[in-house]
Amino acid sequence: MRRLAYLVPLAVFAVVAVYLALGLGMDPRSLPSVLINKPVPEFALKPIKGYERGFTSEDLKGKISLVNIFGSWCIACRIEHPFLMELKKRGTIPIYGIDWREEDPIAGPKWLAQFGDPYTLIGDDPESKAAIAFGVTGAPETFIVDETGTIRYKQVGPITADVWEETLKPLIDELRRRSKAG
Amino acid sequence: MRFVIIMLLVALAPIPAAAVNPSEVLADPVLEARAREISKDLRCLVCQNQSIDDSDASLARDLRVLVRERLTAGDSNEQVVAYVVSRYGDFVLLNPPFKGTTYVLWLAPAGIALIGIVAVVVFFRRRQGAAVAPAGLSTEEQDRLANLMEDEDR
């Protein structure tokens, strides 16, 4: 029994070591969103330059959609962009865009003209009004919003084909099944 | 000479490194002071170990502006902080609150210190007990020792 007592420090060390080792593998930037299963914040964004309609929280009611925060200055958004175009082509789900923090109001529209516009509606958010309301910490971030206007998931970082197949699509399918059953 | 030294001291004096832009500062000094106070406790989400008061990140700037807008609109300090927490979670608070999920964080240092104190007390109690126990060798052991010493001498 006395012998076993000497093993206690070792056991404590082992537990701490395991936790620290797990911590090393975690990304301190991927914060859990507190907005999951909460209603989308209310916002009303003006259109970006050259576009007629802006984007408000009302536009999200009645269907499952993606809300994508992007910016022409954001390199990861550039990586994500072709896949959003692909999603638009497939017509799986409407994608709404929040053009975040453009220094030059023409930069966003120019970027979309060059690479294509995958968005149903786009709002201009030069002062992070909507971005802060969504708890955004960087771009790109994408939210899955269900037909009741409730946030169901937050994707931090670009949507790639893998992210789509493994995470987003199964979630969206599940939401669709549930909304049909309800 | 004295003038030069004074000028040098002035030039080298540490300047408080707040990131607040002159254009962001509110006209009302009381509100501005409250805004600064709130900003010091809010984490910049981009450079995570700085407050939004210290950070040059554009998101930090927009959060500072938001804090000031809310104060101007008549929010209390608590209301402003509650809004930001409702968007980003407790993580934005540089001083985490004492509640269910943070008990380990707050109590672990005291707990570990307590374990240490108990261990030290137990250790010294035992040693005292051991010192009281009769020291010295039994007859058998003294014989063995004597034999060994003889072997050594040879």
Image (cartoon, rainbow, N blue to C red):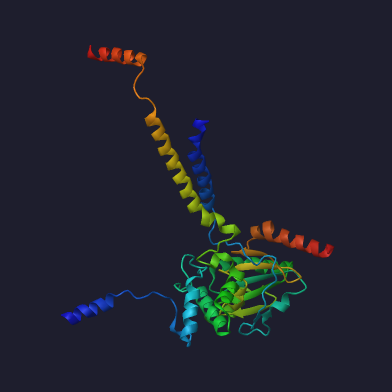
Depth check, front residue: A104 or A101: A101
**Residue at figure coordinates x 48%, y 87% from the top left:** B28
Residue at 65% of width from left, 83% of height from top?
A51
Picture coordinates of residue A149, whole percent (x, y):
73, 72
Percent across and percent down for residue A150 are: 72, 69
Residue at far right of view:
A181
Camera-nearest residue between B78 and A44: B78
- Residue at (48, 48) in percent of width and height: B114
Q: Position of residue B36 (x, y in %)?
A: 47, 77
Residue A102 in view (yes/no): no
Quadrant the C terminus of chain B occupies = top left
Q: Residue B107, relative to residue B122: is it above or below?
A: below
**Percent from the top left, x then y, of residue A11?**
52, 40
- Residue located at (22% from left, 14% from top): B153
From the viewer's perspective, tell me whether residue A92 is left or right of residue A161: right
Q: Is residue B75 visible?
A: yes
Indicate whether B96 appears above or below A117.
above
Of B99 and A77, which appears nearest the observer? B99
- The quadrant in which residue A33 appears is bottom right
Quadrant, the N terminus of chain B? bottom left
Q: Is residue B16 left or right of residue A160?
A: left
